[in-house]
Amino acid sequence: MTEDVTISVITAAYRAQETLAATVASVRAQTRQDWELIVVADDGVDYRGHVGNGARQDSRVRFMSSGGIGTGPAAARNAGLAVASGRFVAALDADDRFAPERLDVLLAAAEGSGVAADCVNVVDTDGVTLRHAFPPGSPDREIGADDIMDCGVPLHPLVRRDLLGEGWPALRFAEDVLLNLQVLDRAGRYVMVMRPLYDYVVHPASICHRPDAAEVADAAYGRILDGLQSGAFGLSPPANAVALAGFQGKRETNRAFARAQAAGLADSFQAFLALEQAP
């Protein structure tokens, strides 16, 4: 571990033997160097053997276990958060990639507000862009809770450590959406850089490709709505109201996806959204 760490990147790894090397390489290729990468195995695998010699010998790359098998992304990230030493924190999924300038750009944007994200690039396994979180190339701006609910793409912001509270909500689905709402609620401002600096890879093993993807999502949305109605996620009343309406809308969109999937019109949720947004 480096002596002066500004940014801790946390990667939860589950069955990531084929993808993790490229993910780690994208962090090591950053134009900014004062980072640490914490790889949290959530499947009992020693991932040192799957990242290449350069990453194994890089003291900034740390390996640990979540302490369980299949505990889920939120629990694994929180295990990494518990040992993170950076003033800022960012999550990176084990099959996704950072653009080389991402940490530099987002840190400059987050220094004032405490949180910044970018216009995520949703790609398939061939690198073909399916859609973006927001229209790339539009002016950078601050976004609100409605924007977070409406974008339909996981946002993995760079967040000042104190704004993360206890970390990701203990969920296996949409934990990223709720974390973004919580962080916005605490920070009061959330900067969106309208450049695609994060590649979010949709692949055949993704939950959105499973035959029961819509059913799994519908059940998860039901649990989240129950939690919001009871105030379980600690959001302020205005943010909680936006979340309630937003997740109800997401549930309806997911049910529309289920109909499209059954009709053979879309094989994944992201493909369905891309179809819906096509001119």
Image (cartoon, helix red, strand yellow):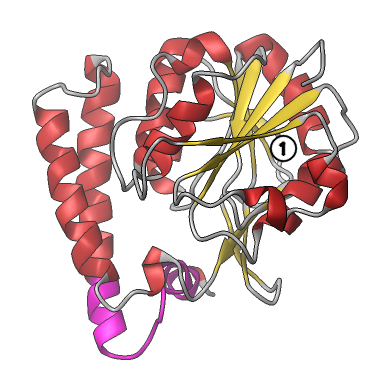
Between 131 and 125, the one nearer to me in the picture: 125
Q: Residue at x 88, y 46 (%)?
A: 54
**Amino acid under label 1?**
Pro
Residue 176 visible (yes or no): no
Residue 267 picture quarter: bottom left
Direction from residue 147 to residue 229 in the image, left or right:
left
- From the viewer's perspective, tell me whether residue 119 is left or right of residue 101: left
Residue 123 is drawn in which quadrant?
bottom right
Quadrant holding the C terminus: bottom right
Q: Position of residue 234 (x, y in %)?
A: 25, 17
For the point 21% across and 28% down, the residue is: 241
Left or right side of 77 for 6: right
Against 38, is 250 above or below? below
Residue 129 is inside the magenta segment: no
SS for callout 1? loop
Residue 108 in the image: x percent, y percent? Answer: 78, 20
Residue at position x 41%, y 13% from top? Answer: 165
How many numbered marks have been drawn onto this rendered protein structure? 1
Residue extending furthest toward the bottom:
264
Identify the magenta region: 256-276
Residue highlighted by disc 1: 139
Q: Please rate how many residues cluster around mark 1, counting C-alpha atoms within 10 Å: few if below 14, some from 14 to 19, many from 20.
A: few
Looking at the rendering, in which quadrant would you find the N terminus? top right
Q: Nearer the viewer, residue 241 or 179?
A: 179
Q: Position of residue 60 (x, y in %)?
A: 78, 29
What predominant SS class does the magenta segment belong to? Answer: helix
Percent of width and height locating residue 55: 81, 44
Residue 161 seen in this snapshot: yes
Q: Is residue 262 magenta?
A: yes
Using the image as rendered, state which of residue 77 and residue 42 is in the foreground: 42
Residue 131 picture quarter: bottom right
